Image: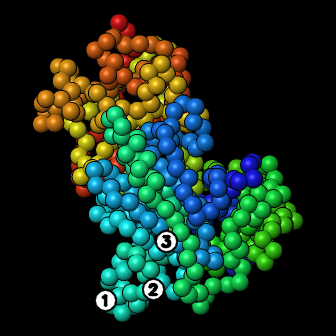
Amino acid sequence: MKASSICVAFGVAASASSLRLSPRIDEATEFTLTFAVPTIETANGTNRFMHKRQLATSDFQDVVRPNVDTLYSMSILDLTHHDLLVDVPVVNDRYWVFPFYDAYANNYVNLGSVHNSTAGKYLVRYTTDSKPGVELCTELVKQKKISSGECHGAEGIVTAPTPYGILLPRYAVKGTNGDLEKIHAFQDKSNIRRIPKHSRSRHEGHRQAPLTIPLLNSSISSDPATKIMQLTARITPNNPPRNISDLNRVNRMLERAGINFHEGTYEPPTGQNLTRAYAASLANMAKAAKQPANLVSLGHEWVQTSSQAQGDYGENYLMRQFIAYRGYLALTASEALYPSYSSDKGGRTMHLGPKEAYLFRFPSKPELAEFGFWSLTAYNAKQFLVENPLNRYALSDRSNLTYPDGERVYGGQQGEQKDGSFEILLQPADVEPPKNWTSNWLPAPRGGGDFSLTLRFYAPSEGLRGGEWAYPVVQKTAAMVG
């Protein structure tokens, strides 16, 4: 790893049943092994933006299941010794969001178009004296909770649940000429500046170590389970769980599993079987993802993670782990929905033979709020974008989709007023369909095989969130050839 890079592992914990005062080692180890699963790598240290200037392609393999709808900026936040001032640019022609995540991938605040957020400066801080969230400075001053000078000219104050975190701004890409350059201008106007902490929480301990490369990267094991335990030992002492009421339980479990909070080290207890506990943790995660409380049936074999188990997870640690494996740093349901097609209520993997295809019949256009958009993206067996001759990785409301009569679904002379049924063809990348299907063809892996899909809705309408929209009917058929 380059010296300028910092590898940040952020946790996802496993929910346990009722706990005894002294939990078993295997029970505690399973819990802990889910606590710091996803890792993310960024250049240039903390508290500065790294801008992604281009959309992902099939060559991009930094994270699984990337979208091709938005450009990102990213910053790893370290609030241990400073507050931050974040500049949010004026964006008035598209969907945008500045999502804040804590050290465990909880999306605790969203500034953006969905919430009609005001551009300007926002003060970001960590303190245990205020609840996590965002508050407008005008209201705080009016209520005499703070003086006007304490806001440093900011529109609002974002209070983080943990001193480590992530800020991941997203901007919708329209796909028109020069559009990426417009987003680059938004990115260039965003900025992060450190300022002195205004006050120190009365409950803050002395163990808040700054987020550094040596803290996370020195003497890390190559064994996945051991690495998780080591990173948990280094991160958790500085970062309480999302629900502070769960702090004692979490600490008790981690200490029993060998996490030394005072030294920030992992010391395996006698009788611990890390390999077995790791397998059990993954099995528990998969089981939790299929539970009715966590999975919503949308009809026509489409399923979706329940809104309570997406983005901001509270104590639902198993679902936090599951989402991290499938799409790290998911937004809350008010910002985005991520339905998947599943014939067995949980098995999202689909399969095509070399001469087979799937037809997705949309009964109507998805219902979206202002600046909302949707896309259907295909991923190969490794959960990366599918290589294909068209370099087409998704179809969406910005694509040249057509109705059966050839009229464009979006952007045509009658397309914006018309709202009939249209179809998307998904078949292997090496089986070219007839010309009249080219615009509606989403390539699957060459030669067929396993793959998966994600249907994304950004800024979904209330009807879409409530399940009132009829989801596409999916039919397997013979591949269409010219």
Distance from Cα at disc 1 to Cα at disc 3: 21 Å
7 left or right, relative to 388:
right
Q: Residue at x 25, y 42 (%)?
A: 366
- Residue 14 showing in the rendered view: no
Distance from Cα at disc 2 to Cα at disc 3: 12 Å
Image x and y of residue 437, in percent? 31, 17
Quadrant of the drawing holding the C terminus: top left
Residue at the top extreme of this rendering: 482
Q: Eyeballing the image, is 254 above or below 226?
A: below
Q: How is the image coloured?
A: rainbow
Q: Earlier in the sequence, mark 2 or mark 1?
A: 1
- Numbered tag placed on residue 142 in the rendering: 1
177 left or right, relative to 103:
left
Q: How many marks?
A: 3
Instruction: Name the amino acid, label 2.
Output: Glu
- Numbered tag placed on residue 85 in the rendering: 3
Image x and y of residue 11, in percent? 62, 61
Task: Please tell me whether mark 1 sits on a helix, a strand or a loop.
Answer: helix
- Numbered tag placed on residue 150 in the rendering: 2
Distance from Cα at disc 2 to Cα at disc 1: 13 Å
Task: Please tell me whether mark 2 sits on a helix, a strand or a loop.
Answer: helix
Contact (CB < 8 A) between labels 1 and 3? Answer: no
Q: Residue at x 79, y 49 (%)?
A: 223
Frontmost of labels 1 and 3 is 3
Q: Eyeballing the image, is 165 above or below 381?
A: below
Instruction: Name the amino acid, label 1.
Output: Lys
